[in-house]
Image (cartoon, rainbow, N blue to C red):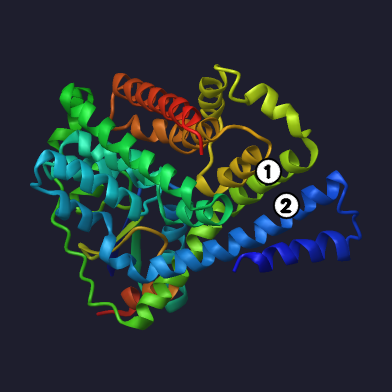
Amino acid sequence: MFRVFTLLGDLVAYRWMGLDPATRTAAAVHFFVEDVTKIFALLVTVIFVMGLFRSMLSPERVRTYLEGRSRWAAYVMAVVLGAVTPFCSCSSVPLFIGFVEAGIPVGATMAFLITSPMVNEVAVALLLSLLGWKLTVLYVATGLVVGVVGGALIDALRLERWVEAYVWKIRVGAVDLAEARPTLATRVRFARGEVRDIVGRIWAYVLVGVGLGAALHGYVPQDFLARWAGASNPLAVPLAVLAGVPMYSNASGIIPVAEALLGKGVPVGTVLALMMSVVALSLPEMIILRKVLTVRMLGFFAAYLAVSFIAVGYLFNAVRF
Amino acid sequence: MKEIKVLGSGCRSCQLTAEMLQREADALGVDVRVEKVTDMADIVGYGVLRTPGVVVDGKVVHAGGVPHVRTVRGWLQGA
């Protein structure tokens, strides 16, 4: 089904641009054309389809699902709902306040916030098409586990004391969004709006990501990365996590880079660690969350994520696929 | 006169929403006052967890993302 994009790459790189398939430029152009067209086609399809069902999964609904659950049920539901509920990072603060105020444990709320940017339908679609189902399952499973463990840890250590005091005083109004049962027409209109919104927000990341991936793919010598970031270098995993911190991207931007890195012989664990670090450890997100969390809590949050991504990296480098 | 509040921390979507509301109101000749609510406690006080949210005459009509133009016209023309 994805062969059409390979053929499109052939057409543009070899036929129209007349490049010799053996050259580096041809390899880079081919990678770029194939990935950009494939990613955008997938994004539009997946976001549209999810948009049709979106009204069932608003954060306001999630809040009522999680309210009054037992702890472990709350963590597990929080990460699963985090994976299927999209929210823009600019909504993190009201979402955090709303969840906590509903009596949902701070840990479960954090689990939701950890998982939501990392695991979502866009990431899954791209992983499946570019990296195959094994890595997709790995990525999703580790993302969910990191979320559950992080949430449980935050509650076990009673870190709710590191939430800004004013948060506990806020009273959240009852949600009375007067939404009539949506008709198919409104659903389609909404889904089209979602496509416009989300693609409008991430297209630049995708282009930069694929551009980087293409450059890596075409111009970096085959053994260069394998030598420096290969399994024989024990520092490669922590370095990959560190490198991901200043890079702020969403899943759709980093996955093409991951594809190119894997192609260059960088081991799976290292690539996973880099991907998760780029997506989940981001300074802008931290700055936004500073409104509701103390610096200590943010420090803990960042340290926990860094340690768990490093662990994920070593674990999957140790296991052969 | 309609009292419209745009709930949001000042993100780009919130500004776009406020601008669109004013523009559509002007185009339709509806008398409105568009106010931006940026205080988090006030925003969640309306029960809105996603920004931007829109409140028309004290009633929450929208949460999350820039609303569709047709939807906006509906609010402005509604009684």
Left or right relative to A297: residue A227: right
- What's the residue type where badge 2 is placed? Phe
Circle 1 residues within 10 Å: few <14, some 14–19, many ≥20: many
- List x then y, in percent, for residue A30: 77, 55
Viewer-proximal residue among B1 and A20: A20
- For residue B12, say whether it is visible: no
Place residue B24 in its image quadrant: bottom left
Callout 1–callout 2 Cβ contact below 8 Å: yes
Left or right: A79 in relation to A246: left
> Disc 1 on helix, strand or loop?
helix
The amino acid sitting under disc 1 is: Gly
From what the image shows, is residue B3 above or below residue A77? below
Which residue corresponds to the image point at 20% horizontal and 23% vertical from the top-left?
A159
Q: Which residue is mark 1?
A: A213
Instruction: Tell me the tag on residue A31.
Output: 2
| A124 left or right of A19 in image | left
Position of residue B59 measured from the top left corner of the image (x, y, whole percent):
20, 64
